[in-house]
Amino acid sequence: MTTIPAPGTIPGDITIVNAQAILPDHIVSNATIRIEHGIIVSIDHSDAGSVGDNTTVLDARHAYVLPGIIDLHNDNLEHEINPRAKANLPIHFALGNMERRLAASGVTTVFHSISFQDQDAKGRSIADARHKAAYVQKFEDDPQHGVRHHIQHRIDVRTPDSIEQALPTLLKARFGYASLNDHAPGQGQYRDVDRLIRIAHEQAEARNGQKTDPEWYLERMRKAMADTETVPAFYRKVGEMMATTDITLATHDDDTVEKVQEQLALGATVAEFPVTFEAARHARDNKLMIIVGAPNIVRGGSQSGNLSAIHLASRELADIICADYHSPSLLPAAWKLVDAGVRDLPATIRMLTANPAKALNMDDRGSLEIGKIGDIAIVRVDDQGWPHCETTIVGGRQSFTFAGSMSSKQDNTAIETAIAETSGVV
């Protein structure tokens, strides 16, 4: 009789057999991957029967086995807390739900995008951002969770004291990561104000049947254009911070070469969601790693009408795929780029794994290699061509298993003991 260890248990070491192992630059068929004490110790064609009695053997049944996804920008914690406006679900409950969704998407490391911004319209405040960041940081890179949690500090350039308020968790983080955000109408993602108003109106009408007041957006744009002090003062503070720290700095929604250049001068090494080819090309020419959103690829275009991520990737102007607002799109995005003839599968998997690891100097993960931590996703493609995660492993521990998808061999007593001794949830 075979038994599947319950998600969240730690039954011992793991050996995966009959795997289509996606290595950094090629795929190995019928591979055997061994994880011991949370570390990958071998990738070969050896007989699984030689493993020890305390090893769980997972038969991948020729599914793909790839490194766990490293998601550098995920907005969903905000939505998990407020699935409707002002729902304010407890953060413990919300983070636990999100963790399970992430694990089911093959994510093993996530950077929660937390906005240090005062904006009533979106229910955001500096105080709330500090609370979320402090809570998430308690679980930073903890392999006892279903996902390794980190923070992307989204620092609003037009909110006074946003950078000072972000510093307590930013400087304490194992992988300090900040993105400089300017969402004022008239620039960046919202440079086309008429389109912004139209989309906002459509969304508001679909949500609650109400109309959007165009004057609210126009007033925001006039106020931003009239303020010639806040943003320069903010950038001076960022420059002072970067001179004394080693955090990773990202630009966001770049629409001009000048904006890219301005943030290059501050020390930016990552460019999120460039909205013009000129800005993306300047980022590439200056060796910034470019992030695009998975749902943009899956949809075949930007939800807000900006650049197609597929077009960027086809011009070698995309290095990393992030969830943005939809984690289940991560795996399909990689496969869609392959189907479009943009890149081969090892290259698109690197966009989910090795490339984000490189961007954040996460040298211990991001590829199936001996010595890397045992963060793994087992993925099968259905008859419609859609990839689905069957099992997620974090540090040699199963954090997610789709019931009936895998076969496993292990002594039942060891499984029952592991279940009794571990909880494995947030």
Image: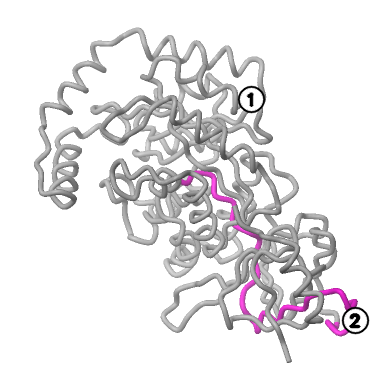
- Furthest toward the bottom, the residue is 1
* Residue 242 in which image quadrant: top right
Which residue corresponds to mark 1? 171
**As drawn, 355 above or below 368:** above
Q: Label 1: how many residues lie within 10 Å, few (<14), some (14-19) or many (20+)?
A: some
Return the x and y of residue 404 as percentages of the image width and height.
Answer: 58, 83
* Residue at image location 55% in from the left, 76% down from the top: 380
Nearer-N-terminus badge (1/2): 2
* Residue at image location 43% in from the left, 60% down from the top: 329
Q: Which mark is residue 50?
A: 2
- Write the start and end of the magenta stretch as one range: 47-74
What's the amino acid at mark 2?
A: Ser
Q: Viewer-proximal residue, 325 or 425?
A: 425
| Residue 65 drawn in magenta | yes
| Residue 229 drawn in magenta | no
Return the x and y of residue 337 as percentages of the image width and height.
Answer: 46, 63
* Residue at image location 12% in from the left, 38% down from the top: 212
* Residue 4 in which image quadrant: bottom right
What's the amino acid at mark 1?
A: Leu
Which quarter shows the N terminus? bottom right
* Residue at image location 45% in from the left, 15% down from the top: 161
**As drawn, 212 above or below 372:** above
Return the x and y of residue 10 as percentages of the image width and height.
Answer: 75, 65
Q: Label 2: how many residues lie within 10 Å, few (<14), some (14-19) or many (20+)?
A: few
**As drawn, 406 above or below 196:** below
Q: CA distance from mark 1 to mark 2?
A: 46 Å
* Circles 1, 2 touching at the beta carbon (< 8 Å): no
Return the x and y of residue 210 as percentages of the image width and height.
Answer: 10, 44
Q: Secondary structure at mark 2?
A: helix
* Residue 198 in which image quadrant: top left
